Amino acid sequence: MPSVSLRIRWTRLLAGGVASALATILVLAAIPTLFGTPRPMVRIYWRNISDPDRITAEQRFRLSEATRQDAKTWSYVPLDTSVNTLRAIVAHPSVEDTDGINRRTGAIADRPPLTPRRGGLLADPPPWMARAARLLAYILAGLSAILCLIGGVRSPLLGPGSKTRRWIHIQVHDPSSALRRLPAAKITGTRRAVTARRVEVIAVVSVFVATAAWRFLTFTGFTNDHYAHLALAQQMLLGDRPIRDFSDPGWPLTYLLTAAGWLVAGDAMATEWSITAAGFALGAAYTVAVANRLSGSLTIALLVTIFEVLIFPRSYSYPKMLVYGAGAWVMLGLARRPSRGRVALTALAIAIAFLFRHDHGLFIGAGAAVCLALTSRGDGWRVALRRVAAMTALTAVFLLPWTLFVALNGGLVQYFEAALDYSKGEAAATALTALPRIVFDSPGANAANAEAWLFWLFWSLPLVCGVVAWHRVREQRERWSGELATVAALVVVSALVNASFIRQALQVRLPDAIVPVALLAAWGLGACWGGRWRRRGYQWVVRSATIACIVVSGMAVSQVSRAPEQYDNSAVGRGLAGVRVRVAEVSAWLRGSHRQDNSSRYAVALLPFFTYLDRCTSRSDRLIVTGEFPDVLVLAGRRFAGDGVVFGAWYSSSTRQDRTLEQLRRDPALFALHMGDYTTFRERFSLIDRYLNLEYAPMAEIPVVEGGVIRILELRSRPTTGVDPTTGWPCFAPASTSPQSH
């Protein structure tokens, strides 16, 4: 009788589970019928475009239901989702970024922003009704899973007294019995091989390889902004000297590294990709190593590193991943033992970060000073100040060669004036006009909420970790030597990085600030999950909150980084055969020149002009580009004229036009290319515009697909030597000059 009762009980449970599953299906099927379905949207981050030009572009691309998200971001419902139209939107010169478009396939993304539901049987139902129905479906699905699980556990196969239950009981409660059956030599060898140190090394190497492989499989070309430092590297290789002949925005090591790579390995795309991939991979490797030490858990370290990799910073952001990961590693060692050697190593790391980009060195230097001062507090504040002063002096010594070079090629005052002018221009063009808010029931809410969540998370973590660290200082509790000094340094660095990097177009800027935040998250998770608190109930409440934060943050990272689009680009979903095809595609692409990297439709339109330059001009000739198109200079293989890469929002100084004019008159460009928003150029650079109108004459106009014209002007005073038979344009080099390739 008991067996019959038991059988009835588990069969009823399974029947209830099946019934709940069917109810889930019915509710989910009824939602689109009753409430309608949402339509896909696209979000466009406009750059340097007037309202009339934006409206014209919206009409040309058939973008309906325009809704302003912030100063530069608009959301739309596209009426034309053809491949040609979506690719034209992505390639438009005034489009900085898009959300909802798969940039590789030219199709609507797998998970685009969505409109409210429309077209259902119920007329204008409140949005909460569809969400409530979906919540009911999820509850029924969860109930189905629970009933099926309980029924399965109570079934004859897994129920009490079954062979499977007895075997599981033995394995859980007496695992040593299984180990006893292994040879003693194998157990000893396993213990020797799998030490914590070796596991960490394996994890670091694996993360390095996996990050490089992921950047390879998801590579879709370099963005337009990436070509800014490539143009500076080319400028130097073609004979110009930094600072004396052109302004350095404050990234000397960034473009010197590219120049060195081109000298050693050639200027194929593979060279620059190798530098960027190595930077990202090293940054991820440093992150997992530091996070492991901060949290005491390799699982937590791998989790935060996965977030860093999947948030997918732009290719030009590789120094941010590298220097902040390496800087954290150096500060961790400094906090453990502030020896002279480690102080010198920290000073060297600060100097290298400064040369990659000056604010990197300032931020890491501030964090290192805090770290060294706090870790030396036990020896007295005089000792702490002396060590900080020694580290600062060593940093200055390491930077002495660069300082002398700047002093001999224009002067430090002029150099920093130009660098500050560049920084002010960039800050003015990209400053946040309003703090992001989490909103519901509005078009594009998912993407906007993801950005808002990450924005406030990035700012909250330094605050929370700082408060917890201060509380630990008061109670004199450290889990390991130098813990509080390291955390305080990371709090300082994270706050500075957030204030500097997180600007307009959050989808692009948030990934730049990921490293310090990820490391603080690792420390916080380790403090929460790594040991037993005196108040166990309070600890489990905090643990539950961290689980919720991890889940929501994962969803937000997926939105911001377009993770489904990355996955599609990688071809991982198409199996081993698809990955092999993808490897062959990317390998062939990287072996080619940068001219194959059609970074914009303007670059595509200029391909005949680039080949004309090879035939009819000298490699020493220069170009002027108006608009945000530094890629044009690299694809053309020509130097820029003036002090900055292009005459755009911040690459050239609008307040120092008199000096720029002196350079242009001393070494004029052969051609000037008016591209993009000419009105903005004329307003910002009125003196340069007047100079071009006086000294240059129209040579050609090149139409751009999907609208726009590139006006090419030639220098009036330059004598011609013939006519190019292919284009009919004048030649400015001897006929015997062989074509030059880039």
Image: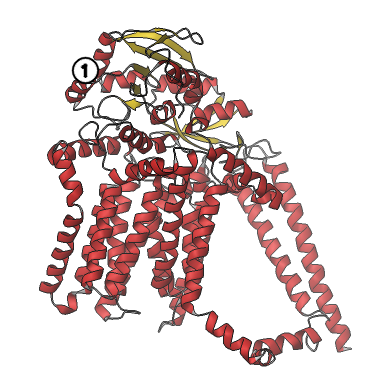
Q: What is the quadrant of the N terminus in the image? A: bottom right
Give coordinates of residue 471: x percent, y percent: 28, 74
One can see residue 438 in this view: no
Please name whichever residue, 81 or 31, is drawn nearer the observer in this view of the structure.
81
Name the residue furthest left: 382
Q: Return the residue nearer the eye: 13 or 713.
A: 713
Residue designated by label 1: 665
Say if 729 sits above or below 523 in the image. above
Secondary structure, mark 1, is: helix
Q: Position of residue 27 (x, y in %)?
A: 73, 52
Q: Position of residue 558 (x, y in %)?
A: 53, 51
Asked where in the image residue 6 lies, by quadrant, the reply is: bottom right
In this rendering, position of residue 42 left or right of residue 668: right
Q: Quarter of the image containing the C terminus?
A: top left
Decide if residue 352 is in sight here. Answer: yes
**Position of residue 77 measured from the top left corner of the image (x, y, whole percent):** 57, 31
